[in-house]
Amino acid sequence: MYYYVKLYVKVNSMTAIYLDIQKDLLKKIESNYYRVGQIIPSEVDLAKEYHVSRPTMRQAIALLVEQGYLERRKKRGTVVTQKKIEQNFTQQIGSYDSQLHKKGFVSHTKVLTFKKEVASKEVKEILKCDTVFKLVRLRYANNKPNVFVTTYMPYSIFKDYAEYDFTSNSYYDLCMKVRHPIVTVKRQLEVTSADETLADLLEVNLHDALFYFHTIGYDPKGVPVEYSISKYRGDTNSFTFTIKR
């Protein structure tokens, strides 16, 4: 239960007012007082509740919109949204866990499949081998499914690790262990939609948009040691690209 405590500040401290309101609204969002998908009270009503002017209230809300916690929708009002995870793996090489931990998220992994198999024509052409390990994982962010990943690994390189625990260990760390660290990656981004299986696994609606990445990872000698197909939820992820002239 939240109780409003009136803020007493100096006249020249208007910045502090809207920041304090922003922090209070954020606490209510993070505690599910305002739930994802819920329309929060109007600026007028909130201004009355916090005993501030409407422009001050608008500043607090605008900051939460900018941070991804709220979204203004025509004819509906301001809605609480699922804050997106700004993924940086399009700009740097690193494990999923390390990327999320830097953003303040808790991650864990569920291994759905890890088996040896004959490489398909596509995988054979990419990894230059006939036999691979196929690793299928469902990866989480703050206990919510976030990405479905299928990774193909050259069997000849990883044959001694058929019992490797990928629920708690990083694939990139394993590559370091076998002296094939991934130092270069090639990624291709597409957009696809969730079929029935992915909608169920990722807990999204059928046909919801997904980010679809193909990744090939190379060791220092240019040997391909990873081919991954990743499907990220479109509603909880964003990707940053930096391009220099």
Image (tube, grey):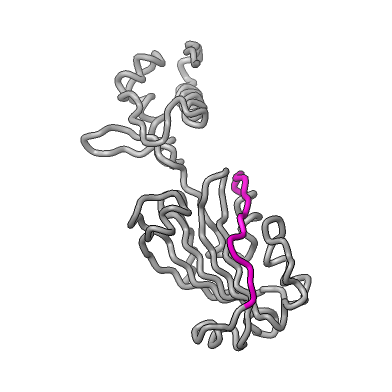
* Residue 156 in view: yes
- Does 130 sit above or below residue 112? below
The magenta stretch is: 102-116
Would you say residue 107 sits in the magenta stretch? yes
The rendered magenta stretch, by its main secondary structure, is classed as: strand
Residue 166 placement (x, y as % from top left): 68, 61
The image position of residue 169, as x and y in percent, is 71, 59
Residue 234 found in image quarter: bottom left
Give the quadrant of residue 167: bottom right
- Residue drawn at 65 percent across, 80 percent down: 154
Above/below status of 20 relative to 178: above
Q: Nearer the viewer, residue 201 or 10?
A: 201
Q: Residue at x 65, y 84 (%)?
A: 222
Horizontal side of 148 relative to 132 (left or right) equals left
Q: How many marks?
A: 0
Using the image, determine if residue 84 lies above or below residue 193: above
Front in this rendered view, residue 59 or 81: 81
- Camera-nearest residue between 30 and 154: 154
Q: Residue at x 57, y 65 (%)?
A: 136
Q: Is residue 15 visible?
A: no
Relative image position of residue 176 (x, y in whole percent): 75, 71
Which residue ends up furthest to the left in the rendered image?
75
> Magenta stretch containing residue 76, yes or no?
no
Q: Position of residue 214 (x, y in %)?
A: 49, 72
* Vertical comparison of 128 with 25: above or below: below
Residue occupying the point 77% across, 75% down: 160
Left or right: 46 in relation to 22: left
